[in-house]
Image (cartoon, grey):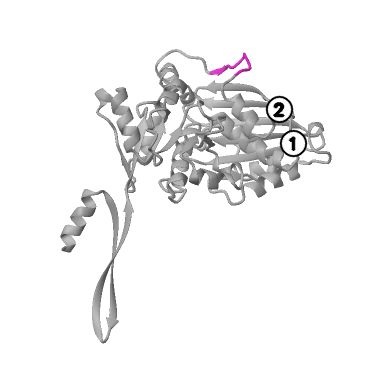
């Protein structure tokens, strides 16, 4: 079989080919050799690709040569039989659907299909024991578990910040299990999907809005479980007149914590936990150091949209040891590390790709 025929076959089968020519000397003769590296292109189906998260996922994957995005014709996008076919044809399915629709779609994986990885962006499976929680930075074991999982529940945007701040401190014994915490958070309006985006971009609207006054927000169960607290926090979310980004804040009284705890100890625990993290950074300790780094706008304000269009998250510790208090803050993009970026990161891990593939680091 000639080289042209081989390459044509590779292209037909959608196999990535890396070629290198080597010249070696065998028995005094120069011999030209051809080395081929073969990597089968993985098929990805985004079920719900026309939604806010789905569009972001597609944008993040569109330029990758190691993936093929498979999509039904627009008129069949909601057709059940078509979606079943695509779900079972794909190597990875990213579900960007409402909870009930995600539950239905997940049930369509054929019993004999042990190949397809499902990544769900809804809240449907986040506290389901049969699904792996998609926060690789949660613990030393979590990334390894994700690499072997076929069912991954993408974290919520607010829980990503809250759990990222509190879980290392619970594991270290600084925050006792059962501590009744409060989490205050502000997000860009894109977190409310296309309907809310239309209101903020085309209609008369509020400059800022708080919500969740029934204290039963759908993110609370995963906050309680994966923080390790085993206690529902009082969660007070807010949206404001910017499209993407968020700041999640957790106030702490030292009276609640391990005796003798200081702001420096809290900062050291978080720094140690995330020291090898690619996407999570613990920023310098305290307001003065943050000011010196130029991380507060006008020397005073922690801007929520700084990490827009990234998969990064920044952690801040603002202590007042004399008052016996500290404020923990996480800054991230609600559609990045809080949604589509996390989905792509989890997909990379599940497929055995480099975790940073497709990201600007």
Q: In this view, does 185 lie to the left or right of 201?
A: right
Distance (Cα) linking label 1 and label 2: 10 Å
- The correct choice, above or below, for 1 with respect to 96 in the image is below
Q: Label 2's element?
A: loop
Q: Residue 181 carries which label?
A: 2
Q: Residue furthest bottom?
A: 28
Residue visible at 28% across and 27% down in the picture: 82
- The correct choice, above or below, for 208 with respect to 291 in the image is above
Q: Give the range drawn in magenta.
A: 208-216
Earlier sequence position, callout 1 versus callout 2: 1
x and y, in percent, of residue 51 in the image: 38, 26
Check contact, mark 1 vs mark 2: CB within 8 A: yes
Q: Label 1's element?
A: loop
Quadrant for residue 350, please give it.
top left
Q: Is residue 108 shown to the viewer in this render?
A: yes
Residue visible at 55% across and 19% down in the picture: 208
Q: Is residue 298 shown to the viewer in this render?
A: no
x and y, in percent, of residue 251 in the image: 71, 30
Q: Which of 19 and 352 is in front in this view?
A: 352
x and y, in percent, of residue 174 in the image: 75, 39
What residue sits right under mark 1 in the picture? Answer: 175
- The quarter of the rendered structure image containing the N terminus is bottom left
Quadrant for residue 187, please give it.
top right
Decide whether the magenta segment is chiefly helix, strand or loop: loop
């Amino acid at each position: 079989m000639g080289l042209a025929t081989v390459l044509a076959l590779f292209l037909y089968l959608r196999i990535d080919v890396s070629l290198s020519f080597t010249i070696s000397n065998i028995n005094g003769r120069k011999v030209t050799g051809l080395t081929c590296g073969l990597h089968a292109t993985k098929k990805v189906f985004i079920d719900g690709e026309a939604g806010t998260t789905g569009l972001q996922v597609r944008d993040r994957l569109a330029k990758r040569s190691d993936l093929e995005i498979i999509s039904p014709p627009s008129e069949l996008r909601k057709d059940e039989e078509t979606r079943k076919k695509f779900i079972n044809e794909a190597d990875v399915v990213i579900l960007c659907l409402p909870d009930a629709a995600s539950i239905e779609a997940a049930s369509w994986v054929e019993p004999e299909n042990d190949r397809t990885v499902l990544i769900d962006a809804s809240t449907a499976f986040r506290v389901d024991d049969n699904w792996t929680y998609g926060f690789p930075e949660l613990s030393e074991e979590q990334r390894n578990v994700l690499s072997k999982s076929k069912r991954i529940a993408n974290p919520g945007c607010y829980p990503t910040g809250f759990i990222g701040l509190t879980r290392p401190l619970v594991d270290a014994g600084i925050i006792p299990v059962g501590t009744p915490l409060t989490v205050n958070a502000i997000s860009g309006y894109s977190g409310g999907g296309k309907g809310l985006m239309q209101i903020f971009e085309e209609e008369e609207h509020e400059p800022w809005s708080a919500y969740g006054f029934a204290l039963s927000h759908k993110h609370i169960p995963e906050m309680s479980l994966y923080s390790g607290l085993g206690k529902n926090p009082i969660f007070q979310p807010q949206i404001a007149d910017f499209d993407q980004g968020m700041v999640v804040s957790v106030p702490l009284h030292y009276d609640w914590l391990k005796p003798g705890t200081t702001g420096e100890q809290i900062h050291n625990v978080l720094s140690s936990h995330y020291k090898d993290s690619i996407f999570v950074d613990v920023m310098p300790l305290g307001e003065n150091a943050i000011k010196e780094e130029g991380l507060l706008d006008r020397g005073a304000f922690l801007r929520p949209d700084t990490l827009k269009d990234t998969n990064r998250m920044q952690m801040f510790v603002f202590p007042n040891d004399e008052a016996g208090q500290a404020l923990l803050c996480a800054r991230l993009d609600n559609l990045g590390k809080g949604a589509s970026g996390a989905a792509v990161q989890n997909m990379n891990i599940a497929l055995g790709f480099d975790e940073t593939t497709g990201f600007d680091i």
